[in-house]
Amino acid sequence: LSDHFAIEAEGAYFPENPQDNYGYTMFLAGARAGWRFGQFGVRATARPGLLHFGGGTFRSHNGSALTRAVLGLGVALELHSPSGLLLRLDSGALAVFFGSRTIRVPALEPEVTPGTTWNRHAALALGFRL
């Protein structure tokens, strides 16, 4: 949109392992604001989205898959090259809004009502600026 504001989206799939754990799909889209100083950039992001729990273990313990609203908030440091390639280090938190839904997770108590959970994350990405 401009040198300081942009719209961005991210989709991620976390495949099931041999024990049927994981199987999550996530989609986030939202705003990014920041500054660029030569080849370096600093950005803040706010991206709402959806997280789908569809793994076999989750479905077997809860009767079905589950999709919940999420909000990703974070900061990114970028290194830009003259060719348009960029290296980006992201750090932030993902809020998952479970609400009053009770879920069963084998590694935890028999049932939990997590409410809203905040999950820290970090990522290293290689991108291309259009």
Image (spheres, rainbow, N blue to C red):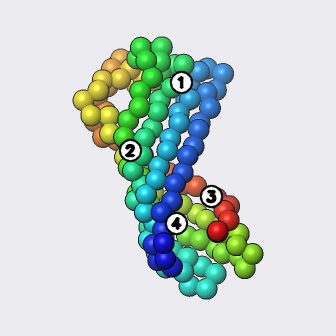
Q: Earlier in the sequence, mark 1 or mark 2?
A: 1
Q: From mark 4 to mark 3, how far is it between C-alphas?
A: 10 Å
User: Percent position (x, y) of residue 11?
Assistant: 55, 46
Q: Viewer-nearest of labels 2 and 3?
A: 2
The residue tagged 3 is: 124
**Picture layout, residue 9 above or below residue 14:** below
Q: Which mark is residue 55?
A: 1
Q: Is residue 83 left or right of residue 21?
A: right
Q: Are marks 4 and 2 in contact (CB under 8 Å)?
A: no
Circle 2 residue: 70
Which sits earlier in the primary sequence, circle 4 or circle 2?
A: 2
Q: Disc 1 or 4, which lies upstream in sequence? A: 1
Q: Observer-nearest residue: 94 or 51?
A: 51
Numbered disc 4: secondary structure: strand
Indicate the amino acid at tag 4. Ala
Q: CA distance from mark 4 to mark 2?
A: 19 Å
Residue 123 rendering spot, x and y as whole percentages: 58, 55
Work out which residue is located at the far right of the displayed protein and give it.
83
Quarter of image, res 115 = top left
Regarding mark 2 in the picture, which secondary structure is present there?
strand
Q: Which residue is mark 4?
A: 76
- Identify the residue shown where x is 59% and y is 36%: 14
Q: Taking the image as drawn, is residue 29 in sight?
A: yes
- Image vertical order of residue 71 relative to residue 124, above or below: above
Asked whether disc 2 touches disc 3, contact meaning CB atoms under 8 Å apart, the reply is: no
Using the rendered view, name the quadrant where residue 87 is placed.
bottom right
Question: Which label's residue is closer to the chain start, 4 or 3?
Answer: 4
The amino acid type of the residue labelled 1 equals Gly
Rendered position, 65 above or below 121: above
In three-dimensional space, the C-alpha distance between marks 1 and 4, rounded to whole angstroms, equals: 30 Å
Residue 6 location (% of width, % of height):
48, 68
